[in-house]
Amino acid sequence: MATLYGAAGLVNLVGRSVDCIKTPDHCDEILRSRIEATRVLGVACRAVASPPPVWVQMATAHIYGDPPSVVCDEDSPFGYGLAPTVGRAWEAAFAEAVLPAQRGVVLRTSFVIGRDRGAGGGALARLKTIARLGLGGRVGSGTQGMSWIHELDMNRLFERALTDANMHGAYIATSPNPVSQQEFMRTLRKAMRIPIGLPAAEWMVRLGARYILRTDPELALYGRYVVSKRLHEEGFEFRFGDLGKALADLMKA
């Protein structure tokens, strides 16, 4: 992740990947990478003669936890656990770091689906690999929420946050149509023209994630349904609000 600074403003994306086994050391790195980077940027803004007028801060939609079926928006209560704790601390660090004269925008981001542009393709690349192996079926109950946003719409949100003087405060950065894990993988297989996806029981996911993929099984077993009430009220129009069309676009060469 990176921090971008230009005439229009500052965009902070810094944070250690959560795609890992949650050892104590990794949990510490996940928290500190976000908090310390934000604090350093706050110090830097105070040290320059002309600080950026806008600060756009990455945050996480996982701040709402993993409710099984409730659809959360910006007014929903925060959840419980590692990710919500990190999310709250991250936003608190931003609130302390941003200058009173700066327009601050927080983007609580969901699962960004995009192409591999030299950085590995993110979580979607891993899901595509799993689908190619015939394992892209239901995981656990399959009802856990998958809230997603196409990379183009994510970039459009960054642009809007930098240029729209009316945009301020916290927004959920996600498409208006979250789906279940089972539906997401069914749609992905269709886009990849893969007819079969074997299901995986919870115990299988826990073993495979830890000992083969070397990641946190809860990333697959739990999820959340989130939508942005604020973006809807402010008239933001998504180019890709439908998952099938979004994935079809990303499968193009």
Image (spheres, rainbow, N blue to C red):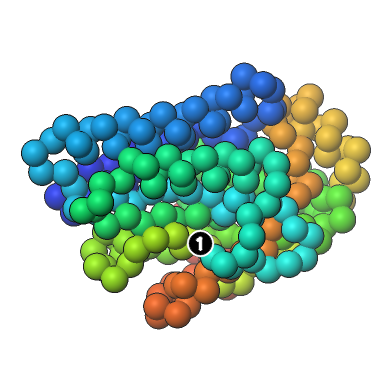
Give the residue displayed 44% in from the left and 56% down from the top. 107
Residue 3 occupies quadrant: top left
Q: Position of residue 132 (x, y in %)?
A: 71, 46
Give the residue displayed 54% in from the left and 65% down from the top. 74
Give the residue displayed 90% in from the left and 45% down from the top. 201
What residue does disc 1 label?
Answer: 172
Q: Position of residue 175 (x, y in %)?
A: 54, 67
Q: Position of residue 42 (x, y in %)?
A: 29, 37
| Front-lying residue, 151 or 250 | 151
Q: Residue furthest top?
A: 25
Q: Secondary structure at mark 1?
A: strand
Q: Residue furthest left?
A: 49
Give the residue displayed 76% in from the left and 33% down from the top. 209
Within 10 Å of the Cα at label 1, are there few (<14), some (14-19), or many (20+) other Cα atoms? many
The number of numbered badges drawn on the structure is: 1
Q: Is residue 111 visible?
A: no
Q: Is residue 167 visible?
A: yes
| Front-lying residue, 75 or 202 | 75
| Front-lying residue, 95 or 158 | 95
| Front-lying residue, 211 or 186 | 211
Q: Quadrant of the N terminus?
A: top left
Q: Position of residue 229 (x, y in %)?
A: 52, 74
Residue type, numbered disc 1: Ile
Q: Is residue 225 left or right of residue 8?
A: right
Q: Is residue 48 left or right of residue 107?
A: left
